[in-house]
């Protein structure tokens, strides 16, 4: 049984599963859900053993009132499309962000400096080395942590949100070719920066960790190394959810605002499949409640969520179908002017609203 079944957020995720069975998705998740903690605690030990065993003992559920939705809407209005565009422009202005290039170090330091202005002193490098084709590469993941300063990190649940900041050309071995990588993945990185900018000023009970990875294009180097680092520090058991941004800025002109929510099914830790799909359905409803996005579910592909899934974490991937729909994929034409900033803004709002709703579960 995975560690997630023994912490509060995953338990609450499990309760959502029962709620989907008990009633329609629209009636349950029309707005945020508040659980009476006193009643909930009566069933805590039973539900951690088996959610089915307590299916008839679910505590009363209330819909969030209109004031709470208004509060969320006000926070979502802070998402700034101009800021997203500026960050995408700057990241794309590097000749390349290829992991093996001479530019990748400068990109890492620029990102760290940018995060430090948003996340104060809670930013650090995770340095690692990678040997490939008899060469040693000294690389960096960049991390920003936001948590309740009144509680121990072990006391609360942790959600990690990640995106890779490296880019590549069609020829993966050409480390010096022009590779602006606006959609892949300056768009995802920019969403991370904007979430940090807004959430760092809020009083949240969840632990949030934002991670920018290098080496995704070469085989998820950064995320694999980071998982090893977390595992070595006995921290993976506290990860309740990992959300991954990988290409969220391209929308074909002839299509609607479709966004893909990838969920876990049939991979290494099958016991987490229900959790992952439930969160995907939850985010889909969030998208409907707070944005103009049309979220669709799909099975996990291949990005930085894989190392987290392999260690037992509940994972979600978010993307724009750019691998198959974006004609600029891994080309020098993947530039900012090809992106739809309002579309990327809506996706950022969708995950911001998701975090705000999950934080209410945790109170």
Image: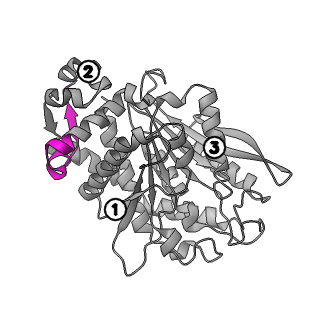
Q: Who comes first in sequence, dot 3 or dot 1?
A: 3
Q: Quadrant of residue 17?
A: top left
Q: Are marks 3 and 1 in contact (CB under 8 Å)?
A: no
For disc 2, the marked residue is 46
For disc 1, the marked residue is 296
Q: Residue at x 42, y 56 (%)?
A: 299
Give the camera-side residue of 128 and 228.
228
Secondary structure under badge 3?
A: helix
Question: In what quadrant of the picture does the N terminus appear?
Answer: top left
Q: Quadrant of residue 121?
A: top right
Whether residue 327 is situated above or below residue 200 in the rendered picture: below
Q: CA distance from mark 3 to mark 2?
A: 35 Å
Compared across the picture, whether 104 is left or right of 68 comes to right
Q: Quadrant of residue 32?
A: top left
Q: Residue at x 38, y 63 (%)?
A: 259
Q: Residue at x 53, y 76 (%)?
A: 337
Give the camera-side residue of 11 and 206.
11
Secondary structure under badge 1?
A: strand
Q: Which region is colored magenta?
A: 19-36
Q: CA distance from mark 2 to mark 1?
A: 33 Å
Q: Who comes first in sequence, dot 2 or dot 1?
A: 2
Compared across the picture, whether 73 is left or right of 231 comes to left
In this view, the residue farthest toward the bottom is 254
Secondary structure under badge 2?
A: helix
Whether residue 171 is situated above or below residue 98 in the rendered picture: below
Magenta region includes residue 332 = no
């Amino acid at each position: 049984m995975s560690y997630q079944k023994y912490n509060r957020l995953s338990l609450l995720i499990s309760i959502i599963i029962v709620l989907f069975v008990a009633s329609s998705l629209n009636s349950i998740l029309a707005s945020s859900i508040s659980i009476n903690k006193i009643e909930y605690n009566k069933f805590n030990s039973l539900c951690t053993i088996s959610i089915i065993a307590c299916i008839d003992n679910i505590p009363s559920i209330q819909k969030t009132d209109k004031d709470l939705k208004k509060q969320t809407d006000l926070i979502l209005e802070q998402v700034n499309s101009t800021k997203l565009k500026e960050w995408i422009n700057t990241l794309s202005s590097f000749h390349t962000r290829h992991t093996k290039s001479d530019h990748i170090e400068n990109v890492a330091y620029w990102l760290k400096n940018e995060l430090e202005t948003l996340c104060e002193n809670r930013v650090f490098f995770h340095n690692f080395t990678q040997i490939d084709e008899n060469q040693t590469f000294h690389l960096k993941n960049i991390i920003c942590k936001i948590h309740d300063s009144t509680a121990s990190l072990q006391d609360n649940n942790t959600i990690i949100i990640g995106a890779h900041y490296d880019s590549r050309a069609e020829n993966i071995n050409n480390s010096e070719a022009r590779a602006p990588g606006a959609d892949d993945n300056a768009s995802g990185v920019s969403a991370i920066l904007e979430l940090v900018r807004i959430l760092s000023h809020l009083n949240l009970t969840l632990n949030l960790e934002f991670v920018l990875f290098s080496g995704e294009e070469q085989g998820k180097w950064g995320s694999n190394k980071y998982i090893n680092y977390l595992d070595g520090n006995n921290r993976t058991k506290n990860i309740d959810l990992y959300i991954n941004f990988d290409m969220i800025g391209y929308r074909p002109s002839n299509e609607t605002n479709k966004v893909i929510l990838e969920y876990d099914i049939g991979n290494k830790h099958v016991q987490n499949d229900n959790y992952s799909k439930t969160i995907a359905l939850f985010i889909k409803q969030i998208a409907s409640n707070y944005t103009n996005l049309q979220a669709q579910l799909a099975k996990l592909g291949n990005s930085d969520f894989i190392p987290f899934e392999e260690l037992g974490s509940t994972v979600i991937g978010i993307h724009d179908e750019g691998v198959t729909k974006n004609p600029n994929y891994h080309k020098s034409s993947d530039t900012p002017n090809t992106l739809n900033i309002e579309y990327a803004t809506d996706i950022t709002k969708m995950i911001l609203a998701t975090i705000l709703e999950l934080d209410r579960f945790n109170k």
